[in-house]
Image (spheres, rainbow, N blue to C red):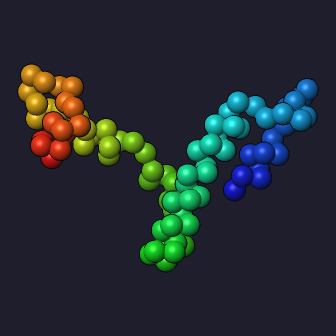
């Protein structure tokens, strides 16, 4: 998974990576670890990366903030109590 990203080269950049390549490689590393953990514990064969996004988390935290009415910047304790 990492090799195609590492092999992208531009003119005058034969030895170094572009910034976007580093960011992709940083993003891939945790995904590989999550996959290994899920494969060992649940026997999954693949992860549909299209389904991975922050929308679910953002919606959840938005609903927690909305429960506070006038206090829309809850502390961690407030979040636990609201949940």
Q: Is residue 70 left or right of residue 39?
A: left
Q: Is residue 11 left or right of residue 21?
A: right
What residue appears at the point 10 percent right and 35 percent down from the top-left corner?
A: 67
Query: Residue 29 in the image: x percent, y percent?
Result: 61, 51
Can the viewer see residue 32? yes
What residue appears at the point 89 percent right and 35 percent down from the top-left corner?
A: 15
**Quadrant (top left/top right/bottom left/bottom right) for the N terminus:** bottom right
Give above or below for 33 relative to 80: below
Can the viewer see residue 46? no
Give above or below for 44 relative to 66: below
The residue furthest front is 77
Image quadrant of residue 59?
Answer: top left
Query: Residue 56 in the image: x percent, y percent?
Result: 32, 46
Q: Is residue 42 left or right of residue 67?
A: right
Query: Residue 82 in the image: x percent, y percent?
Result: 12, 42
What residue appears at the point 51 percent right and 74 percent down from the top-left corner?
A: 40
The residue furthest left is 69
What residue appears at the point 51 percent right and 67 percent down from the top-left corner?
A: 37
């Amino acid at each position: 998974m990492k090799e195609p990203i590492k092999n992208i080269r531009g003119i005058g950049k034969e030895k170094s990576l572009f910034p976007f390549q580093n960011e992709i490689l940083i993003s891939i590393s945790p995904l590989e670890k999550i996959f290994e953990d899920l494969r060992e514990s649940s026997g999954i064969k693949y992860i549909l990366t299209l389904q991975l996004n922050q929308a679910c988390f953002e919606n959840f935290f938005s609903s927690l903030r909305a429960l506070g009415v006038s206090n829309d910047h809850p502390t961690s304790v407030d979040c636990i109590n609201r949940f």
